[in-house]
Amino acid sequence: MKVDLKNTTFIIPIRIESADRMRNVITILCYLLEKFDTNVILKEVDTESIFKRDVLPQIEEYLGDSIKNLTHIFEQSEDPVFYRMKILNEMVDMANTPIIVNYDGDVLLKSETCEESVKMILDGYDIVYPYGFGQYQKMVFADDTDVSNFISSDFSFDVLDKKSKIFDAQYGHVQFLNRKSYFAVGLENENFRGSSPEDKERFYRFEKLGYNIGRIDHEVYHLEHSRGHNSWPNSVNGNPYMAENFAVWESLQKMSAQELKKYYSNQEYMKKYVCI
């Protein structure tokens, strides 16, 4: 029986830049939609829809009727920089559930971790980090056979454990959020473009403004992949906006809580989204 998470929407921004990124997207969608009765919004921004062409045919037969819980949006763009923060905000605006999961296209959480995270949001937390701070990331070096074994074993994480090593986790990967709090705090900062300090800034902002932050000392599984243009956080290998991003981050850290709240309440991008 599937775990009832109908009150939750997983939002996943993607650009499929390699075969292993495609394999990861297939894996996480099969897992989320098979294990949970939930909602998934996946927005793909690229020159063409790799998802529709190559991924959807592979998962439709496996998922059967569960595919109805997946909403795929494609936006054609020639921009080489993946505008993750804007894409996330657009999906938050689309969602109509009280709980939102900002979910990376390469991560997995055990079922009990997802259930506990949702319960914590319902109990009053504004944002929940479903993994511990420090050595709580399992970097998974899986090939096609390993992933097939994971899926065919009814998603036994023992399969992934054999292919993993422990690494650091802090603020990225995935967060569970109260949707109303997400809007109130200013959503994702669209002044950050591409890879940036947005994960640290998000935590800093929730903490600075006095929101209720939760953390669970569980592990997050990251399915490793090759690093394309949008996977590097520096201007040399990937993001040409990194200097501007860090200038924004430095400026935000100097603000008082009142100044930070005013800054986000006056952001032009917020006017695009539904007020709740």
Image (tube, rainbow, N blue to C red):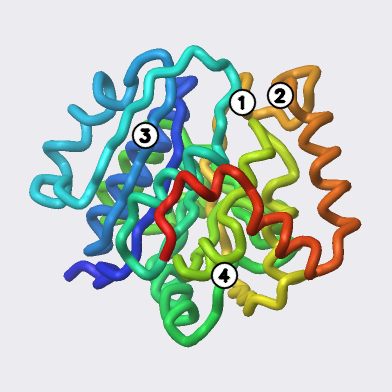
Query: Helix, strand, or loop for circle 3?
Result: helix
Task: Give the mark, 4 or 2, whose residue is nearer the N terminus.
Answer: 4
Question: Could you give the CA–CA distance between mark 4 and mark 1, rounded to whole angstroms?
Answer: 26 Å
Side (left or right) of 127 relative to 148: right
| Image quadrant in which the N terminus is located | bottom left
Residue, disc 3: 145
Side (left or right) of 185 relative to 207: left
Query: Helix, strand, or loop for circle 1?
Result: helix
Question: Could you give the CA–CA distance between mark 3 and mark 4, rounded to whole angstroms?
Answer: 35 Å
Q: Percent from the top left, x then y, of residue 79?
A: 54, 16
Residue, disc 1: 230
Q: Is 252 in front, or is 214?
A: 252
Callout 3 crowding tier (Cα within 10 Å): few <14, some 14–19, many ≥20: few
Residue, disc 4: 127
Question: Could you give the CA–CA distance between mark 1 and mark 2, rounded to whole angstroms?
Answer: 7 Å
Question: Could you give the CA–CA distance between mark 4 and mark 2, rounded to whole angstroms?
Answer: 28 Å
Q: Give the residue type that dot 4 points to.
A: Ile
Query: Helix, strand, or loop for circle 4?
Result: strand
Callout 1 crowding tier (Cα within 10 Å): few <14, some 14–19, many ≥20: some
Q: Percent from the top left, x then y, of residue 228?
A: 60, 21
Give the residue at the far left of this rendering: 65
Residue, disc 2: 239
Task: Give the mark, 3 or 4, whose residue is nearer the N terminus.
Answer: 4
